[in-house]
Amino acid sequence: MKNDLFDLSGEVAVVIGGTGVLGGGMADALAAYGAQVVVLGRNSERGAARVRDIEAAGGRAIFQSADAMDRDSLAEARDQICNALGPVSILVSAAGGNRPDATIPPGGDFCKLSKEAWNGVFDLNLVGGSLLPAQVFGETMLQQKKGSIINIASMAGMIPLSRVVAYSAAKAAVINLTMFLAREWATRGVRVNAISPGFFPAEQNRALLYKEDGSYSERGGQIIGHTPMARFGQAHELSGAVVWLAAHRASSFVTGQNIVVDGGFSSTTI
């Protein structure tokens, strides 16, 4: 008998932040299991490259331009996607990141952290990274009485990591919003969950984790020392979690959860 627990055929999946390393890996995974994937973002060149990679692997994907920080832009993108492919049933909100002026240097003064820097990081990760996408795409899912929203939080949202206090606070808010929406929409056909990756090298944090010669930085070494698997994660290692949460038959009774994928890091710090 065919086992179709994770079959996403007929589903339309939007991956916001699918032009990045982690979001791109999740877009690849959803396409591999049959979903029609929409890579949504502002960088058309990187978006087109991701679409080519998915199609080369036998999947189906398109790029859709939109600004996750602009509700009207997201709504226009949603309507275009619906007209072209049908209603969106899976939303992965993987946009986010930190910025240098919101990172407190070693020995730095928290009291000197500017409100502008704080707001920039908080809005990027909470407002654009979860709130607006959930409002815009969730509205259609509620009408269809079907949908899975997957917010990408962070280990930093569970543990107040040093130096990146604004980022940590924003990701903690993402987890809280995820639980709120899960409770509100539980009887209306829409499941809302989060994935909290541990430490996965990407463009924005590579310099923090590695020296120029490729060896671990002091901070990178400390993280490895607190990770039972003694290594960083790789983008494809988020595939199982995102496909499981996206597939209704596999996770139909799962909502309001924060799935941690961290090589055991949290087991040594909580």
Image: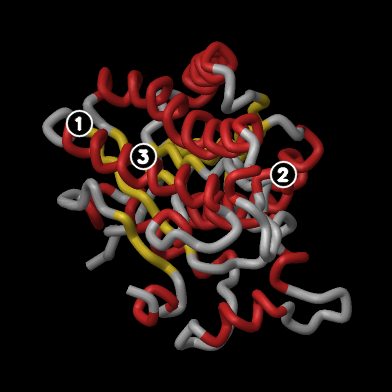
Q: CA distance from mark 1 to mark 2?
A: 37 Å
Which residue matches tag 1? 185
- Residue 241 higher or lower than 124, as above or below: below
Which residue matches tag 3? 149
Say what secondary structure mark 2 lies in. helix
Say what secondary structure mark 3 lies in. strand
User: Of 255 and 50, which appears nearest the observer?
Assistant: 255
Q: Going 49% across and 67% down the picture, which residue do you hit?
A: 198
Indicate which disc, 1 or 3, sits on the residue closer to the N terminus: 3
- Hey, what amino acid is under mark 3? Ile
Label 2 crowd bin: few (<14), some (14–19), many (20+), radius 10 Å: some
Picture quarter with the C terminus: bottom left
Say what secondary structure mark 1 lies in. helix
Residue 206: image x %, image y %? 73, 65
Colour mode?
Answer: secondary structure
- Name the mark nearer the viewer: 1 or 2: 2
Which residue matches tag 2? 101
- Hey, what amino acid is under mark 1? Trp
